[in-house]
Image (cartoon, rainbow, N blue to C red):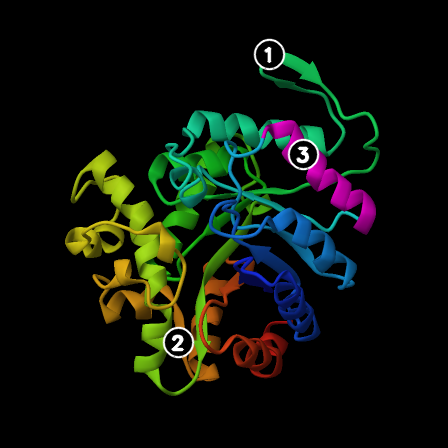
Amino acid sequence: MDFGLVLQTDPPASQVVSLMKRGERNGFRYGWTFDSAVLWQEPFVIYSQILANTQRMHVGPMVTNPGTRTWEVTASTFATLNDMYGNRTVCGIGRGDSAMRVAGRAPNTLARLGEAIEVIRDLAEGREAVVDGNPIRIPWITDGKLPVWMAAYGPKALALAGQKADGFILQLADLYLTEWMIKAVRQAAVEAGRDPDSITICVAAPAYVGDDLAHARDQCRWFGGMVGNHVADLVSRYGEHSSMVPDELTEYVKSRQGYDYSHHGRTGNPSADFVPDEIVDRFCLLGPAEAHIEKLRALRDLGVDQFALYNMHDAREATIDAYGSDVIPLFS
């Protein structure tokens, strides 16, 4: 199992780079960041510095979207980083939640996302693709490689990930839901004539190492609010108790009153006050290192290839170090 470190690009950018360097020293092979141009600093600028200051770490957004940048710009940016640092990028992509909504736009449709996955990958790897009806190719790319991993929750999005993506990003660590969603992605891959085992499975969730469980929950409750924001869309689309979406995913958002993006992804987010302790425990990894190891082994047995650790709380350095000393060596 690989391990990734997920950060927000809050200023100063030097601190983001420093934490990623610390992550690599502790065995993290992937460095991910949020991508929301209004809420945080521009990640692709920072990726260049992360790549320059690490030797093996792969970097990418968790996640970008097909609406805030034109597709040829996205592809060229990834390809430039790869040309400079040796194919060490991954394109995590989704419909766009905060990035689109904060700018007053609706998230992208799945049809647009599916088209973007293929176009961005083709362009970044030097192949011709059609953009807005025009065939184009980036002529200077020779040996580019860009895996495209798609974030998804709902049944149609899971199917799209299985049909077109190189990897599947699931932003929660609940064992039941992880098993259900991996099966959905792999079944869609089989139906599309693809090898289901060729799709990399990445589970992303907050992790907090320590014995004070109440404090850890309070530090990570924001995550249930963030996930709930996506889940609310599923409820509005499919209805409550739909056979298309498990109740285990949707039931807890009943008391959700709304969402304030100014607190998105942050400890103490008041928009997460509806999230019960049970959901925090199910979606996150909390407690002493032994509890993390037990859950990670269960995730690995379900087919998870990478655990990406959301590190937005008051023990960022300590959590990175604890994983480096007590957790990651057991999964090497």
Location of mark 2 (residue): 286
Q: Residue at x 50, y 29 (%)?
A: 114
The local crowd at label 2, few if under 14, some if 14 to 19, many if 20 or more residues have their Cα within 10 Å, is many
Q: Quadrant of residue 232?
A: top left
Quarter of the image containing the C terminus? Answer: bottom right
Tell me the magenta residue range: 70-85
Location of mark 3 (residue): 75
Q: Residue at x 37, y 77 (%)?
A: 216
Most distant residue in the bottom direction: 211
Alpha carbon separation for disc pair 1 and 2 = 49 Å
Dot 3 amino acid type:
Ala
Q: Is residue 306 visible?
A: yes
Mark 2 or 3, which is nearer the eye? 3
Q: Earlier in the sequence, mark 3 or mark 1?
A: 3
Q: In the rendered image of this protein, does residue 166 appear above or below residue 114?
A: below
Helix, strand or loop for disc 3: helix
Location of mark 1 (residue): 133
The local crowd at label 1, few if under 14, some if 14 to 19, many if 20 or more residues have their Cα within 10 Å, is few
Q: Is residue 189 visible?
A: no
The percent position of residue 285, horizontal first and vertical second, equals 41, 71
Dot 2 amino acid type:
Leu
Alpha carbon separation for disc pair 3 and 1 = 17 Å
Is 245 a magenta residue? no
